[in-house]
Image: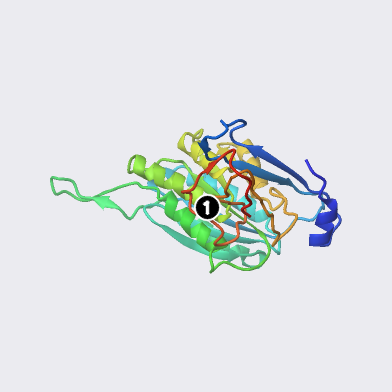
């Protein structure tokens, strides 16, 4: 751990204390071997008492399997909106066989319209398959999580996103009952990982079931997992959606990493990754070689 107080005062103009720690995924490696190492750089922010603005994307599963669970989600979202501050923004996104934004840039002034959009959500599907005997098409239930998260990512951190300084996060509500085999599950996990790399922390709320696939997806996103099934779950959801859940101590900050002993930096990501600063995950390095720097 290091005391970065002088540098923090110089860069950000405030007196605060930042603790930086580095954790390696593999504690030991064999010298001279080709190896890819993952390092987690953790910055513990100072306690300032100030909670920054937040932009939160609520991604709600409205596939047919959510018919008896959607009311539970609406109750949780209403409690989240109750704590909305004047400087916060909320986006509401629904998904079933495809995804769509139901309401964007929700604010305190537009809370009534946002609540109307929430109450209008109903379980549905746009995918039907006609049986082989030629009888009427049968609706097929399919939760397209990956498309819902893609819209959330676009609204939060793409070039069309707002430029205001705020924490930006996504919260997914789903029962995790997907159709389409392993390909559909893999696509959803990949979507969580893409959000993570793009700088969008994700909270996964499993509705009506204990987790399973959704618990694993939360691990891939390195985000929170909440089982929504009663009063305790409601409290956890509201707490996780609050702007103070992830403390922010700086915006537009730069953390410079330097490698040595022949290592090369091949990829970086963070909760607010600088756009374009991602190198292809194709290189590796050999430990024990001559010392070089790659910043």
Image height of 26 relative to 140, above or below: above
Residue 259, given in percent of the width and then of the height, sits at 64, 48
Q: Is residue 143 left or right of residue 4?
A: left
As rendered, which of 206 and 68 lies closer to the eye?
A: 206
Residue 34, given in percent of the width and then of the height, sits at 51, 38
Label 1 CA crowd tier, 10 Å (few <14, some 14–19, many 20+): many
Residue at (68%, 51%) from the top-left corner?
242
Q: Is residue 289 visible?
A: yes
As rendered, which of 91 and 158 lies closer to the eye?
A: 158
Residue 68, given in percent of the width and then of the height, sits at 45, 42
Q: Is residue 271 left or right of residue 135?
A: right
Image height of 270 relative to 69, above or below: below
Residue at (44%, 41%) from the top-left corner?
176
Residue at (55%, 50%) from the top-left corner?
267
Q: How many marks?
A: 1
The structure's colour scheme is: rainbow
As rendered, which of 58 and 161 lies closer to the eye?
A: 161
Q: Is residue 122 visible?
A: no
SS at circle 1: helix
Q: Is residue 113 left or right of residue 183?
A: right
Q: Which residue is mark 1?
A: 195
The quarter of the image holding the N terminus is top right
The quarter of the image holding the C terminus is bottom right
Residue at (74%, 58%) from the top-left corner?
250
């Amino acid at each position: 751990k290091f005391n970065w107080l002088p540098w923090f005062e110089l860069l950000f103009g405030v007196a605060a204390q930042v603790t930086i720690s580095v954790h390696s995924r593999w504690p030991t490696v064999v010298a001279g071997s080709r190896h890819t190492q993952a390092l987690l750089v953790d910055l513990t922010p100072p306690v300032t008492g100030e909670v920054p603005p937040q932009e939160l994307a609520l991604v709600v599963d409205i596939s047919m399997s959510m018919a008896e669970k959607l009311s539970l989600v609406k109750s949780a979202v209403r409690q989240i909106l109750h704590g909305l501050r004047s400087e916060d923004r909320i986006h509401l996104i629904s998904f079933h066989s495809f995804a769509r934004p139901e309401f964007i840039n929700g604010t305190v002034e537009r809370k009534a319209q946002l609540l109307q959009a929430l109450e209008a959500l109903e379980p549905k599907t746009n995918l039907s398959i006609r049986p082989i005997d030629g009888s009427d098409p049968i609706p097929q239930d399919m939760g397209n999580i990956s498309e819902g998260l893609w819209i959330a990512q676009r609204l939060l951190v793409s070039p069309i996103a707002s430029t205001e300084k705020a924490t930006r996060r996504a919260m997914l509500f789903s029962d995790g009952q997907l159709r389409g085999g392993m390909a559909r599950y893999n696509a959803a996990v990949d979507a969580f990982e893409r959000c993570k790399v793009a700088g969008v922390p994700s909270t996964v709320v499993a509705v009506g079931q204990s987790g399973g696939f959704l618990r694993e997806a939360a691990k891939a996103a390195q985000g929170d997992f909440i089982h929504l099934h009663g009063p305790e779950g409601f409290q956890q959801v509201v707490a996780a959606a609050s702007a103070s859940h992830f403390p922010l101590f700086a915006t537009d900050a730069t953390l410079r990493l330097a490698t040595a002993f022949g290592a090369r930096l091949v990829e970086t990501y963070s909760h607010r990754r600088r756009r374009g600063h991602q190198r292809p995950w194709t290189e590796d390095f050999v430990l024990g070689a001559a010392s070089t720097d790659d910043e």
